[in-house]
Amino acid sequence: MVMKSRQGGNADGHGQPPLSSIRLVAFLGLALLLALQKQFKMLLLLQPSPFLDQRMFGVTATPKVSPHNNTTLNAVKLNNTKIVAVANSEYKEIALMWHEQMTKLGYTTHVVATVDEDVHSFLQEKGVRVETLLPRDSGNWPLPLGKPQQNRRRIFGTRWVHVMAQLQKGYNVLLTDADNIFNRYLPMEELESSKYDVFHAYAGDFPIRFLSMGFTICGGMAWFRSSPPSIRYVQSILEQCGSRDLGSMAQCDDQQVANSQFFDNKLNYTFYNERPRDDTFWKHSLEGESQVTGHKFKIWDVNMAYRGPVDGKDGVCPKNNWVAMPLNSIEDPNNRVRKGDAAGERRLR
């Protein structure tokens, strides 16, 4: 004979639970499901880069994280910036002059990333520190030759692959065009000890299709911290440039890609100060943060990183200028407004 408990279940404790308990379990299960769904959406936005190996940043199960840039404190190294200029055979003489000028100013970590064997051998014989843009055994170095415009895009896209490779090795990277003119020594510790993951330079009138947002940034003058947020930012560029891994070639106009991320707000940027107007040349610095990658950025003011006329009514290169960049011409065939662009409704003044 089976005896019944006062709660209606079996005396051995295997009876049915009360209805209130079932409702409580169902409610808790639903709450857990909603919480997991929200967490999954966040992981989609901040998914780790396929290039990212967190062991390089000393990440452990309970890492100590800097409140400034979301990188582990034991990964912050001073005087750990590699200064990289990219050159092919057409730019080998310019790259040589760039390297000599950087040495004269007192820099010691500058290197030329070469696109082909001709420029590599030429610079190496001159005593220039060189490294290949892609690994020699990748099958993509030297970069395959095509039409001039295609070659430019391969160099512009693949230099971000090289940046990613250096960041993964633990180096911070100052990426610069070989024809940028550095006028004074700036200790890289000033950038490394800042709260920013990425520094940009203004790009003047290029690309014109983005001028209505008040500014454009340069693809060939930027600094990157070796931090997870910075790596996520570089990954976002590489995804649009078609790179699969650190041994593959990418192809894009990186300046178009980087500016489109601001213009279309693909990375959900928040600005810390007022954006400059599109009709002002002497632009102040601009700071902000991406809510997608988590990287904090600063755009140097025009005095620091100068791209503009060297004479005329707009003034001359600032006396305390750090780096000056060649000015793109509005007649440049790459500097055109695409049909349907919001920026196309505006004209340069």
Image (cartoon, rainbow, N blue to C red):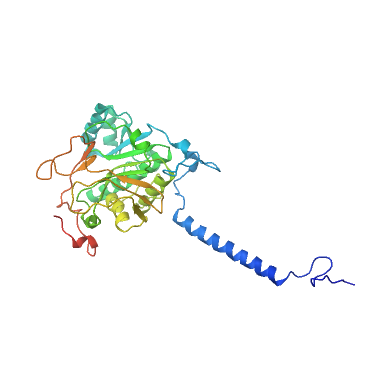
Residue 132 position (above or below residue 349)? above
Q: Quadrant of the C terminus?
A: bottom left
Is residue 224 found left or right of 34 in the rendered image? left
Question: In the depicted view, which residue is nearer to us: 150 or 324?
Answer: 324
Measuring from the top left, give residue 110's x and y in whole percent.
31, 32
The mark tally for this picture is 0
Q: Residue at x 19, y 57 (%)?
A: 336
Question: In the depicted view, which residue is nearer to us: 177 or 95?
Answer: 177
Q: Residue farthest to the right?
A: 1
Is residue 284 found left or right of 192 in the rendered image? left
In this orientation, does residue 138 appear?
yes
Q: Residue at x 30, y 42 (%)?
A: 222
Measuring from the top left, give residue 285's x and y in whole percent.
27, 45
In this orientation, does residue 179 appear?
no
Residue 26 position (above or below residue 76)? below
Is residue 127 found left or right of 10 in the rendered image? left
Q: Quadrant of the N terminus?
A: bottom right
